[in-house]
Amino acid sequence: MTTTTYTASGPTFSDRIDRHDWSTIDQARYLREYILPLKPVIITGGFDHWPARKKWCLDFFQKQYGHLPLEIDRRKLSMATLIEEVKHSTPTRPAPYLRNFLVKRLPKELQRDIDPLPECINPNWLNTWLIKLWKDWRFVELYIGGTGAKFPFLHYDGSHTHAFLMQLEGVKEYVAFPPQQTSLMYAGDGRFTENASAVDNIDAPDLARFPRFAEARGVRFKLHPGETLYVPAGWWHTARILSPSITVSVNCANAANWKDFARDVSRNWEGSSVKHTMGSAYLFLAGALARLEGRS
């Protein structure tokens, strides 16, 4: 693979990211080379079994589910209205971006269109009975947006979970920075903002405000229909839409990020020493049980 380096008044990017067809990489190698060392990768063919792979497109949602009510950035609109605006979206006048919409809020038949979830998201300890008995920390989410729309900010996923992003229609461009560069990201203070960067323009950052951001070294690449992107826990990332797009995401935790996940979740009980101790012990036990069950 050739490498292209982009230079500007800001970070330096490479386009190097590994890509594998799911049928050609065995689970042991996948875990050893990508999941456990927290290395991003793009998998093709991971969700070809989904009915959504052939059905879900802009016209499908507009014609069959146009009546669904939505709210985006405090604006109430129907799915049909959203899709119409997405079709006419431009970089200068982007349509509203439906993001982080819980799939469990969709009609049951649409939920079945993405079942079962791809094998490449496994192992996912959030699916273990001991975790689900306490709380459902797994989020399966829908994203629909038009050309020029962007995710609002550079971030890593909450509670240090991994993100798996399945691209159904359109093309997205992602940028990502490894956790080792967190000190360059100008993350906010406090537990609610530590995973969000204050840098508001990656392509033309205000280096007077964010001088260290110019030292960042990241990857910039495109995600195409039929591909699944693995964004490991703690990796800073954001995306912009190059063509009208439909994406499904799911979060995940396993041996690679369980310690950080448990620490982040336990912070919710820092005001109560009893809850903090019990919660931390419960998460430790859940992780230990998952290991014993062979869920790497």
Image: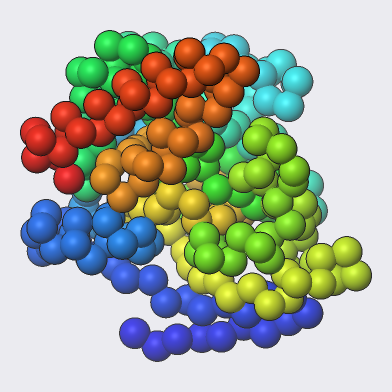
Q: Residue at x 14, y 63 (%)?
A: 29
Residue 258: x percent and y percent?
A: 34, 40
Q: Residue at x 67, y 84 (%)?
A: 7
Residue 66 makes an appearance in the image: no
Q: Residue at x 16, y 29 (%)?
A: 289
Depth check, front residue: 168 or 270: 270
Residue 96: x percent and y percent?
A: 69, 35
Depth check, front residue: 138 or 59: 138
Residue 104: x percent and y percent?
A: 40, 16
Q: Which corner quadrant holds the C terminus?
A: top left
* Left or right of residue 89: residue 50: left
* Left or right of residue 170: residue 95: right
Q: Is residue 185 above or below residue 246?
A: below
Q: Residue at x 53, y 65 (%)?
A: 180
- Residue 107: which quarter of the image? top left
Q: Which corner quadrant holds the N terminus?
A: bottom left
Residue 163: x percent and y percent?
A: 41, 44
Q: Is residue 14 above or below residue 148?
A: below
Depth check, front residue: 255 or 167: 255
